[in-house]
Image (tube, grey):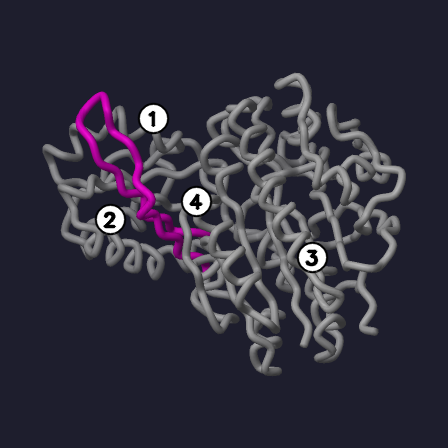
């Protein structure tokens, strides 16, 4: 009975990707710049696994202050380059699942307007409420600027970002969550012809000058274009548990159990519970706080704290693994909290592959996140995935 734990540190990039210039991200390095900005990092578990060894494997590598290379890393280590077009959550996770998006999702101008009149008019008509905003904005900033008007009018606050997103903000006391979620389902259908990556429900509460977003966010991704490796695992009888927001990211398919969590502490708790109780199959966890709370808000101190908390969590995971277990730690994109703007950054992502009782080795640069999909099919011995090269042995 084999297990695998795939842990995604959401947005923890490790240096600009070769095509970073196409995204305006030359010079980004989430881990190295967070370390410099905060003095140094202290990540004993990740260091022992080989996180500090990775910068030497990539052209844009910069040493991580406080996380030097380990002379005998416990895990195999390397970096992955994304092949899909984009630098968002859905694109990164779908590529890990074995897909490639080319072309990528549509990104929209800053506006106003950002979205086409026909799309916004259809959304307003079908939901029975007017739309305000229709521009690129920080989520916290736009509810501060338009929240009072939203309360007065009962309108939807619609906005986008540098990612392919149609975000809908609404005060929970003005528009109940069930109506917000229904509106997102309407928007998802209307947005499909425009190849919008995600429709996102952004509920908030509070009063003017003191609004804040709640944990009742929901994501509605573009329909999956083809089956994923997780569909293949489930079809082969391998249990798959998703933890965090991954049930949303994968449109409710490709898993046998979901532990939905809208923050990292809850996701860590759910993963530890699975470590104790799931004796076979895959546990796939996303830790979102790096990205949601600190990367977009350009808060390197908060980002560093989240890294330390994740390191303590990984210490518990490593301690609970046995000889038939596999641990893969990676990320889906970058979000350098010291970089200009508020958006994701196109970066290599770290790759750490730990199997108790084996010796770590250099994995180099993997040319596609889908190497994870290929490796999982090897690990669970269900036949080779069509894309990628495996970094684990089936024996």
| C-alpha distance separating marks 2 and 4 | 34 Å
Q: Which residue is mark 3?
A: 327
Q: Earlier in the sequence, mark 2 or mark 4?
A: 2
Looking at marks 4 and 1 on the same chain, the residue that comes earlier in the sequence is marked by 1
Q: Which mark is residue 121?
A: 2
Question: Dot 2: within a 10 Å radius of its alpha carbon, few (fewer than 14), some, or many (20 or more) residues?
Answer: few
For the residues bearing labels 4 and 3, Cβ distance under 8 angstroms: no
Residue farthest to the left, as pictured? 152
Q: CA distance from mark 4 to mark 3?
A: 21 Å
> Picture coordinates of residue 169 (x, y %)?
28, 41
The residue that disc 1 covers is: 141
Residue at (22% x, 51% y) in the render: 177
Residue 65 point in image, percent of width and height: 74, 23
Where on the picture, by quarter, is residue 301? top right
The residue lying at 43 percent from left, 51 percent from top is: 198
Q: Toward which corner of the image does residue 1 lie, by quadrant? A: bottom right
The image position of residue 214, as x and y in percent, is: 30, 40
Looking at the rendering, the stretch of residues picked out in magenta corresponds to 197-222
Badge 4 crowding class, 10 Å Cα cut-off, few under 14, some 14 to 19, many 20 or more, is some
- Viewer-side label of 1, 3: 3
């Amino acid at each position: 009975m084999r297990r695998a734990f795939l842990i995604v540190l959401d947005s923890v990039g490790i240096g600009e990707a070769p095509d970073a210039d196409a995204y305006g991200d030359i010079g980004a390095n989430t881990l190295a710049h967070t370390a410099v900005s905060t003095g140094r990092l202290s990540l004993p578990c990740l260091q022992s696994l080989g996180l500090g060894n990775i910068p030497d494997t990539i052209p844009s590598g910069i040493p991580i202050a406080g996380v030097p290379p380990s002379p005998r890393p416990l895990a195999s280590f390397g970096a992955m380059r994304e092949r899909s077009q984009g630098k968002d959550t859905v694109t990164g996770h779908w590529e890990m699942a074995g897909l490639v998006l080319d072309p990528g999702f549509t990104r929209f101008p800053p506006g106003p307007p950002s979205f086409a009149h026909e799309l916004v008019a259809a959304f307003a008509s079908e939901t029975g409420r007017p739309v305000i905003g229709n521009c690129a904005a920080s989520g916290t900033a736009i509810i501060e600027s338009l929240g009072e008007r939203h309360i007065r009018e009962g309108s939807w606050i619609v906005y986008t970002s540098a990612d392919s997103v149609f975000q809908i903000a609404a005060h929970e006391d003005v528009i109940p969550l069930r109506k917000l979620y229904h509106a997102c389902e309407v928007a998802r259908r209307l947005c499909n012809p425009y190849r919008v990556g995600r429709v996102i429900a952004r509920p908030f509460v509070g009063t003017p000058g003191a609004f804040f977003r709640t944990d009742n966010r929901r994501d509605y991704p573009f329909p999956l274009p083809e089956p994923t490796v997780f569909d293949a695992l489930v079809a082969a009888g391998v249990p798959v548990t998703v933890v965090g927001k991954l049930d949303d990211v994968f449109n409710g398919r490709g898993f046998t159990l979901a532990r939905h969590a809208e923050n990292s502490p809850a996701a860590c708790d759910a993963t530890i519970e699975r470590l104790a109780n799931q004796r076979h199959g895959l546990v796939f966890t996303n830790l979102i706080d790096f990205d949601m709370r600190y990367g977009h808000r350009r808060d390197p101190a908060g980002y560093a704290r989240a890294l330390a908390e994740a390191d303590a969590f990984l210490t518990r995971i490593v301690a609970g693994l046995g000889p038939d277990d596999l641990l893969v730690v990676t990320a889906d994109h970058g979000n350098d909290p010291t970089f200009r703007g508020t958006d994701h950054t196109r970066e290599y992502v770290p790759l750490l592959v730990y199997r108790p009782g084996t010796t770590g080795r250099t994995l180099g640069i993997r040319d596609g996140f889908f190497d994870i999909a290929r490796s999982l099919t090897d690990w669970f011995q269900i036949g080779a995935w069509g894309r990628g090269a495996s970094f684990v042995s089936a024996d």
